Structures are given as C-alpha cells and as structure tokens.
Image (tube, rainbow, N blue to C red):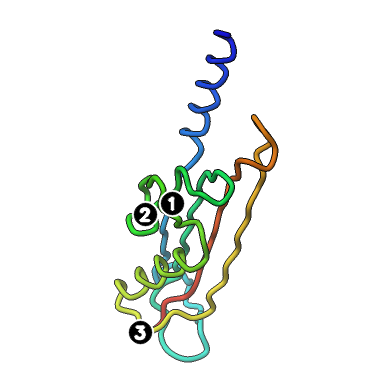
Amino acid sequence: MKKRIALLFGMAGAVMLFAGCSSLQSAGAQSFNGQQITASGTGVAHVSGYASGFYLLSIPLIVGSTEKPDTIAFGEDSCNVTAVTNMVTAKSKALNASRTVDLVSMSNSTNIPFPFPFLFYWRSVTVSGNAVR
C-alpha cells in the first residue's frame, strides 16, 4: 500500500514538473541580416508562441497560460490554436506592427498510458508569424 501511494505521489510530482508551460518569444528586425520577411511593408519581428498542458480527457488540469506567458494556470483551456494565436498577435500589436502575416500553427496531443490508457493527455500548440508595419 505504501509503495502505491509513493508511486502516485511520484507520478503527481512528475506531472507538476512537466505540465503547464507557455512561452512567447520574438526576434527583432536586427536579427534578419538585412533580409525582407514580407513582400510588402517593413518587417518588425518574428513572433513565436507555445503552450502545453496536462488534460484529463478534455478537461484541462495544469496548462501554460496564454494570457500571462511563462506562468501556469489551473483549469484554463489555453492549449488550442485560437488562444496561442491571440497571444502571438497581441505581442505583434505590442511591437507596433499593423499586421501579422505568414501565421503557421502546429498542435499535438499525446496519450499518457499511466495509470490508465486514454484517460490523461499531454497537449501542445505552437503558433508563429511575422509582425509587419
């Protein structure tokens, strides 16, 4: 019995270490090496956003917050393309860009087979785009 409880606490600790991550990064125009990133307008930055989280079926448990990047949120369904796109375009707007072009997204969902298959999932979403004036 004690071994099972220790195993459950160990698994819960591992989930807390790896679940609930979000980040928002941008590379300014000085990083473009004089290259144009768009056919029209002036490139301001390339912006990339990421969010991941731990889900019970479709219920978010521990996720990375898209409203406050680099923080953890509990019960907030932010591991979806819409939420991460909002995070990326808000950063683009904060950089005084008038539009965000060439948006690309990727989402992934992986089943975690412990302790029961098809019950817990790890989801992640990445969105990137170019901020342009």
Which residue carries the number 1 mark?
22
Q: Dot 3, how many residues are within 10 Å of its Cα: few (below 14), some (14-19), or many (20+)?
A: some
CA distance for labels 2 and 3: 22 Å
Which residue carries the number 3 mark?
98
Residue 20 percent across, percent down from the top left: 45, 44
Contact between labelled residues 2 and 1, with CB atoms less than 8 Å apart: yes
Q: Nearer the viewer, residue 35 or 1?
A: 1
Residue 119 percent across, percent down from the top left: 63, 41
Q: Judge whether 59 appears above or below 94 on screen.
A: above
**Which residue: 64% across, 29% down?**
115
**Which residue: 53% across, 15% down?**
5
Please state which amino acid type lies under the numbered disc 3: Ser
Q: Nearer the viewer, residue 82 or 97?
A: 82
**Which residue: 60% across, 45% down?**
121
Q: Dot 1, how many residues are within 10 Å of its Cα: few (below 14), some (14-19), or many (20+)?
A: many
Question: In the rendered structure, which disc, 2 or 3, sits on the residue that comes first in sequence?
Answer: 2
Secondary structure at numbered mark 1: strand
Q: Residue furthest top?
A: 2
Dot in front, 2 or 3: 2
Residue 61 percent across, percent down from the top left: 46, 43
Location of the N terminus by quadrant is: top right
Which residue carries the number 2 mark?
69
Dot in front, 3 or 1: 1
